[in-house]
Image (cartoon, helix red, strand yellow):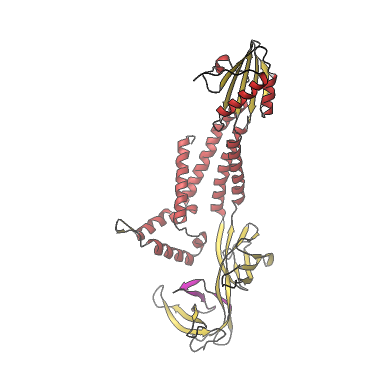
Amino acid sequence: MTDVRFTVVQIIIVVAAGLIGTLLRQIPASAFQDPTQYASELADLHTRYDPLTILGLHVGPSLVDVFLALGFFNVFSAVWFTSVLSLLAVSIVVCTLDRTPRLWRGVHDVRPTQPAPFFDLLLNERAAFVAPDLAPAPAVAYLRRHRFKVRETVDADGVRHVYGDRNQYFKLATLLTHLGLILFLAGGAITGAFGFETVLFVGQGQTAPVQPVGTPDNLLIKNLGFQAPQRPDGTYEDYRTELAVYQDGRQVALATIRVNAPLTFDGFVFHQNTFGPAEDLEIHAADGTLVWSGPMILDGSIGGQPQGFMTIPGAPIGLLGLLGTDATGAPSLTLLGVAAGSGQDQLQPVFADALALGATSDPAVTGGYRVRWVDASQFSGMVIKKDPGQDFIWIAFLCLISGLILTFYFPRRRVWARFDEGRVQIAMLADRYVPAEREFGQLLDGLAARWAVAPERART
């Protein structure tokens, strides 16, 4: 677990999985809760990938089946991906716990005094000043001016030492980075396990439950009005929905949502996502009873024309609607009634008719039902998400950024000066992100200006 190579292998697997999830079309999480949507998504995958050939072999259909079995079309919610993330999180925790004591000792335990061989001029960042009566005060002043924490000591032989330490504890910022990685993985796991996402199409005046019916404290949304104003050139300048949210029979939220202005309530975020045609219908049964008054949502397409489907309430008849134009260019709504056939999973047509806007069908033609096309409107499509791991992700982001900034922009520097009988030996150690040679040169220039004597360095 503490082997860095093992952790690197896990990171490579996670990155590869992320690449797969980016390159391959992913099935929305909402489709796994809706058999109809799942079947539609599966058909779309086959349409996309079935024509694929490799070296002349038609491998598309088999590849789709294999990728489905491996979870490549739902990578980020697949069990194997979650397992790898969990293992990576455990590895990071174990590595952090193993490294922390050594890291703490490295930054906390310092040696303000060093023996003479430590200052050997043949070593990097070493120099000496030779002159009588060189006092420590200029060196102390220079180091403090450059934000070094300075200590002055005298060893058993009476030799004076000056030690400067800058950014002593900032190396511990790597622990902040590790914490960020752990929180990031934890947030992803929490979202994967307890998060929620669905897509709802709601006509004007229509309501719909957010979660499956029967869910405790379920939310109900209502489209109070949708608008999609157009520019003079026919393009849409905006689209927005006045959305009300209800819980336990009372309104708990109300807002106008746009693409970049969602409504948030109780952890749920309601995003304006799309819109499309919805045709308001009134359907009366043979006895005159009103069985439906509301929009038929045309969220599909047949031959490039908007298409939708609904079931006539209280009847074993489905109604397929196709929006088009008649010979004069006026709007026309074709209605096809279908019912279950004699064979399993078979449908058979019951009636077919075409209505003009505002017209009513002949019950003799439309299976005994009187269908009136009341108005042409639009539906609002919303993506509704609940991401319980979001706070963890934000905290993780702050930890990662803070850790990286502190690590890369505030690396540690240490300087030793040994004063012994008219000779001052200087040494410097710095983290790898420090331009040590340049900073050591600046240190020597500053000390030389104060002591009025040139330093000695090893000749190369």
Q: Is residue 24 above or below residue 450?
A: below
For this rendering, which residue is in front, 361 or 403? 403
Left or right, 278 with reference to 166 = left
What percent of the width, then of the height, locates residue 382?
58, 65
Q: Is residue 223 magenta?
A: no
For this rendering, which residue is in front, 95 or 138? 138
Q: Is residue 306 magenta?
A: yes
Confirm whether residue 111 shows in the render. no
What percent of the width, then of the height, locates residue 349?
43, 81
For this rendering, which residue is in front, 9 or 365? 9
What percent of the width, then of the height, locates residue 125?
55, 23
* Residue, far left: 56
| Residue at x 49% of width, y 34% of height | 2
Q: Is residue 187 above or below residue 235?
A: above
Q: Is residue 391 above or below residue 286?
A: above
Q: Tell me which corner region of the image, top left, top right, bottom left or bottom right, holds residue 117.
A: top right
Confirm whether residue 225 shows in the render. yes
Q: How many marks do you count on the picture?
A: 0
Q: Is residue 413 above or below residue 9?
A: above
| Residue at x 39% of width, y 75% of height | 343
- The stretch of residues the image draws in magenta is 294-317
What percent of the width, then of the height, locates residue 190?
56, 50
| Residue at x 54% of width, y 38% of height | 93
| Residue at x 59% of width, y 48% of height | 393
